[in-house]
Image: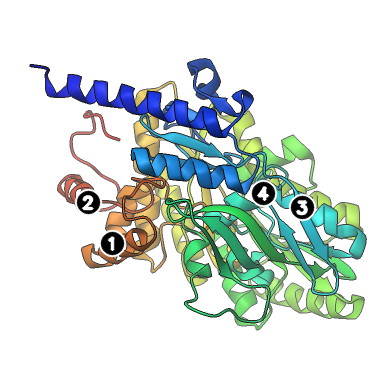
Amino acid sequence: MNAPHEVSLVADDARRSALLAGLAKILPDAALLWKPEDTVPYECDGLAAYRQVPMAVALPDNEDQVCAILRLCHSLQVPVVPRGAGTSLSGGAMPIATGLVLSLAKFKRIVSVDVRSRTAVVQPGVRNLAISEAAAQYNLYYAPDPSSQIACTIGGNVSENSGGVHCLKYGLTVHNVLRVRAVTMEGDVVEFGSEAPDAPGLDLLAAVIGSEGMLAVVTEVSVKLIPKPQLAQVIMASFDDVAKGGNAVADVIGAGIIPAGLEMMDKPATAAVEEFVRAGYDLDAAAILLCESDGTPEEVAEEVERMSEVLRASGASRIQVSQSEPERLRFWSGRKNAFPAAGRISPDYYCMDGTIPRKHIGTLLKRIEEMERKYGLRCMNVFHAGDGNMHPLILFDGADQDEWHRAELFGSDILESCVELGGTVTGEHGVGVEKLNSMCVQFSAQERDLFFGVKAAFDPARLLNPDKAIPTLARCAEYGRMHVKRGLLPHPDLPRF
């Protein structure tokens, strides 16, 4: 009699053979990867700490192929992980050993740009920045602008509900997408939302946006386009204390001003960035705020003056206003290159993504300073200050297992502090596999049951991107047994996920 694990291996081998044979009938040879040397590049996304080589990778180039692939996987009960550009920082596209990676990289056609309705229809593999480049000839652009916009795709933006430096005034992906066309795990094509002012039936568009590939596979997206402003200027405000800078954010919003962008960086971040891109940052400041105003020249002049007054009253030691478009872009290039700049000064970095009420920004920054001493690791802070979306970058050496463990505890501590301060464990990077334990802290068992209820309504067999974003009851019970407030786990020598 065969041992249970031997029976399982035989079943997996049979399923793999059936999957590859079925996929070979749907896709040309070049669009089906199954050899180890071909599938290894898909073992992780931007969160490279967690890796898993998939059973196979499929690269369809049309919706009919996607439908056929999903029907095949459903019939064989093979898990499917949808993948875009792989820039996600939460492990949302990490493969499953017995599953298929479904890459939408070939879906990169801009279907249409409608000037009269100010909309664009694009496939999910289209890069975020490419939409604005295509619309530029009509003096239009797509507002959400993640720092990875030169590489990240609109399908991934939909999956993670991405934001960017201008999300304060113009909104996240969910506020700029009108319609999503997608395929269910059973291979059925469905549409959510509409290009019309309203759509019949249940409003499920917001549920799909930010669902991290767990509900359906996106094949087409209709987005809003907005006119380019006549003028935009950026204020760079310097502060001699990070708490003052954090409090200034709340002061600006409290004054009734909604800037086009409101970003903050601390001294370690500006030092790393300045060496990398020469953005012209004040290296003596403990923190800087980048505050953008856009509109007509008259509107911008008035708003810049009002913001400058508020910033000075909040303790700004220096205020510099961009005097040209190249200078404005240079100021923003520094903020958008913070992550690669961190990569130049540290072997590895761990990017967190918590969100807190604006009034507590200064409090969290002070706590992070204490955590640096507690865990013996450096941290750079860059974030979307206007909506309280924090992106601390914990610097460590991944080759040192002890440093990696301390970095994980540091990150958990930050996220649990965000929850304690009235915030949430993610703003725009998603949960993926990275924040599953943190979800146990923020949400009750009843709330998690509701999440699974939504998942089951779309994907009863739980085959689409399983074991991501929503922690199981057993996982939370295990974490609860280990958990001590703010990241301190007993027995740190034991291996964990």
Q: Nearer the viewer, mark 4 or mark 1?
A: 1
Q: Is residue 487 left or right of residue 23?
A: left
Foreground residue among 328 and 11: 11
Instruction: Report, in whole angstroms, how far the alpha carbon at label 3 lies from the one at label 2.
Output: 42 Å
- Which residue is tagged 2? 476
Q: Residues within 10 Å of mark 3 (few under 14, many from 20)?
A: some
- Which residue is tagged 1? 448
Q: Element type at marker 1? A: helix
Instruction: Report, in whole angstroms, how far the alpha carbon at label 4 lies from the one at label 1.
Output: 31 Å
Q: Looking at the image, tell me whether mark 4 or mark 3 is earlier in sequence order.
A: 3
Q: Residues within 10 Å of mark 4 (few under 14, many from 20)?
A: some
Q: Residues within 10 Å of mark 1 (few under 14, many from 20)?
A: some
Q: Looking at the image, tell me whether mark 2 or mark 4 is earlier in sequence order.
A: 4
- Which residue is tagged 4? 147
Q: Looking at the image, tell me whether mark 2 or mark 1 is earlier in sequence order.
A: 1
Q: Is residue 339 left or right of residue 367?
A: right
Q: Looking at the image, tell me whether mark 1 or mark 3 is earlier in sequence order.
A: 3
Instruction: Tell me if residue 46 can be seen.
Output: no
Q: Element type at marker 2? A: helix
Whether pointer 4 and pointer 3 mark residues with C-beta atoms closer than 8 Å, the reply is no
Q: Looking at the image, tell me whether mark 3 or mark 2 is earlier in sequence order.
A: 3
Residue type at the position of mark 4: Ser
Q: Looking at the image, tell me whether mark 4 or mark 1 is earlier in sequence order.
A: 4
Q: Residues within 10 Å of mark 2 (few under 14, many from 20)?
A: many
Whether pointer 2 and pointer 1 mark residues with C-beta atoms closer than 8 Å, the reply is yes
